[in-house]
Image (cartoon, grey):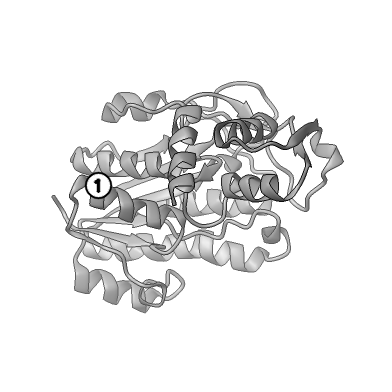
Amino acid sequence: MSKILVIGAGGQLGQCLKTVAARRGITDIVFPAEQDANILDETVLRNLLSAEKPAFVINCAAYTAVDKAEEDQAIAKAINETGAANLANACLETGATLVHVSTDFVFEGNEVKLLKEEDVANPINVYGLTKLDGEKAIEHILPQHFILRTSWLYSEYANNFVKTMLKLGAERDELNIIADQVGTPTYAIDLAHAIFDIIQSDSTAFGLYHYSNEGVTSWFDFAKAIFEISGTSVKTNPIPGTKYPTPARRPAFSVMDKTKIKETFNINIPYWRDSLVQCIRVLQEN
């Protein structure tokens, strides 16, 4: 198999890629330290790709603090747009294919329908806008790319909604959870498998793809499932998003259509709740 380089190796998805690579016996893969793979430093990137000569670069590096991005607009733009462009340029120079991870937050989410890749993206927050601009930069610079939009990412690594709910559920008797934002949780281990499936397919069907777990849920029902599966006893109350205002607006409905990725790469996508059971089992064992 061709050599793979992972940018953003220390983050949630980067750690999941490391775990899945070990499970699948993928050995020709490099996980550089952050200072050796700074996507804001074009010289560092060029030197890294020239030295490693990867056939594939997976970009997991991103500014993902959705609310903070509203005030840290320059930093979010630098990482999510300029950094993506820098990486695309480095890949172009060295002939590498880029696998870039994006988000369902590029959509406005004001319509109840499965979102396809060709649907108009109209972000309603800075994070979504900078991620969309990053997609556009890659599309403009580098023909050989796979952009994967995903949603509500969680795993046993880093900070995420599942780990936050388990922590709060253990500390409190009652929680209020937003019930009118609907999407699909995605187990980052499943996304990592999908990325390796695409790389190992040797496909040149470059372009934009949607990937999340199967199914639909709200944050409230997601939390209820976390507590039920983990055996956590806590009273949960559904509330409208208006009762919990945040600096960044969120899409009300951002469920993505995965037909394209399933048919192109023959990928089998697990149901969100089945994957949640697996993740919680791992967390409880550790």
Residue 253 appears at what percent x and percent y? 65, 29
Residue 284 appears at what percent x and percent y? 48, 45
* 182 sits left or right of 194 in the view: right
| Residue 141 visible in the picture | no
141 up-or-down from 213: above or below: below
Looking at the picture, which amino acid does disc 1 mark?
A: Arg
Residue at 41% over, 72% down: 34
Q: Residues within 10 Å of mark 1 (few under 14, many from 20)?
A: few
Residue lying furthest right: 243
* 25 sits left or right of 242 in the view: left
Residue 131 appears at what percent x and percent y? 54, 51
Residue at 55% over, 67% down: 78
Residue lying furthest left: 1
36 up-or-down from 190: above or below: below
Q: Nearer the viewer, residue 42 or 190?
A: 190
How many numbered dots are placed on residues in this image? 1
Residue at 18% over, 49% down: 25
Q: Nearer the viewer, residue 42 or 140?
A: 42
Residue at 48% over, 47% down: 283
Residue 186 appears at what percent x and percent y? 49, 38
* 148 sits left or right of 252 in the view: left
* 236 sits left or right of 152 in the view: right
Secondary structure of residue under mark 1: helix
Residue lying furthest top: 113
Q: Nearer the viewer, residue 244 or 209?
A: 244
Q: Nearer the viewer, residue 190 or 252?
A: 190
The residue at which mark 1 appears reads as: 23
Q: Quadrant of residue 189?
A: top left
| Residue 53 visible in the picture | yes
